[in-house]
Amino acid sequence: MFLLVFKLVLAPLLIAMATLIGRRWGHGVSGWIAALPLTSGPVSLIFALQYDSTFAAQAAIGTLAGLASVSTFCFAYCRLARWHHWAICITFAVTAFSLITFLLNLFALALIPVYVGVLILLTLTLRWIPKPKTNLEIMVAPKWDLPARMLTAALIILIVTYAAESLGPQLSGLVTPFPIFATILAVFAHQQLGAGAAIQSLRGILTGLYAFATFFLIVGALVTILPTAATYALAVGVALGVNVFTLRFVR
C-alpha cells in the first residue's frame, strides 16, 4: 500500500516537472529527465529494505531487462508517428512492449548479458529511428494540459500496479519500467505539436536510459555485497555521471 501511495504522489509530480522542463528547454531534455529512475530507483530501495537484498538484486535484473521492451516501444512509436494518428502509434507501441516482455519472461535472465544487450539495443534504436526537425513549432499549452498529464500518470500507475500484483517476481520486474512517462510525453507532444515533438521526446528518453540501465547494473551487482546505503549511493552517483555525459547528445 505504501508503494502504491508513493507512486501515485511521486509520478504526477515528476511528469509535471518533466513537462515544465520541456516547455523551457525542449522536448528532448524533457524526455531525458523522464528517463531517470526517479520512481523505479526509490521503489528498488524499498524492496531492499522491506524484503532483502537478494530480492532487490533479482528485481533489478528484471527491471533492467524491461528496458529492451521500452526501446521497442519507442522504436514502434517513432517509426509510425510521421504518418499516423497518435492513437495508432500508442496502440502499436504498447503491443510491441507487451510482446517483448512476454518473450523475455520465457528466459532465465542474467545481469551482465542483459546489461550489454540493453546498451546495444538502445544504441541501435537511437540510430534507426528518424531524427525530428529542429525547428519545431512553439505553442502555448492550454490550462488543462498539466493537470491532465498528472491525472493520466496516476491512472496508468494504478493499472500497472494492480496488473503486476498477480505476476511472478521476474515478470513483475519486467513490467516495472512500463513507459508511463514516455507514453504521456509522446502522446501529448504528438497531439499538440506533431510527430517531430513526440519523436524528440522519445529520443531524449532513450538517451536517458543509459543512466537508468547503469543504475540497475550497480544495484544488481552490489546490493548483496555492500551495505544497502552504500550500494544505492554509488548507483545514484554513477547514473548521474552517465546522464551528464549523455546530456550533450540531447541538447
Image (cartoon, rainbow, N blue to C red):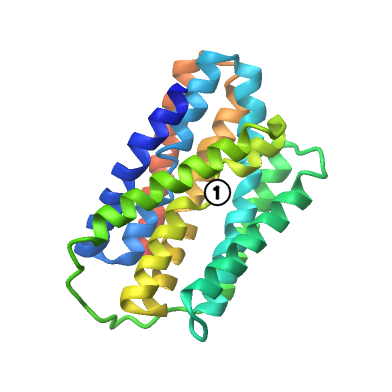
* Residue at which label 1 appears: 178
Q: Quadrant of the C terminus?
A: bottom left
- Residue at 54% x, 22% y is 47
Query: Which x, y percent locates residue 173?
Result: 63, 37
- Residue at 51% x, 53% y is 179
Does residue 246 appear to the left or right of 50 in the view shown?
left
Up/down of 136 relative to 235, above or below: below
Query: Which x, y percent locates residue 236?
Result: 42, 33
- Residue at 45% x, 41% y is 37
- Residue at 70% x, 50% y is 101
Which of these two is toward me, 45 or 221?
A: 45
Query: Which x, y percent locates residue 202?
Result: 45, 64
Is residue 21 visible to the viewer in this orientation of the structure?
no
Q: How many marks?
A: 1
> Disc 1 residue type?
Phe
Where on the picture, by quarter, is residue 60?
A: top right
Does residue 189 appear to the left or right of 229 in the view shown?
left
Does residue 102 appear to the left or right of 66 in the view shown?
right
Up/down of 62 relative to 193, above or below: above
Is residue 8 visible to the viewer in this orientation of the structure?
yes
Which of these two is toward me, 33 or 191?
A: 191
The residue tagged with tag 1: helix, strand or loop? loop
The local crowd at label 1, few if under 14, some if 14 to 19, many if 20 or more residues have their Cα within 10 Å, is many
Query: Which x, y percent locates residue 182?
Result: 45, 58
Does residue 90 appear to the left or right of 229 in the view shown?
right
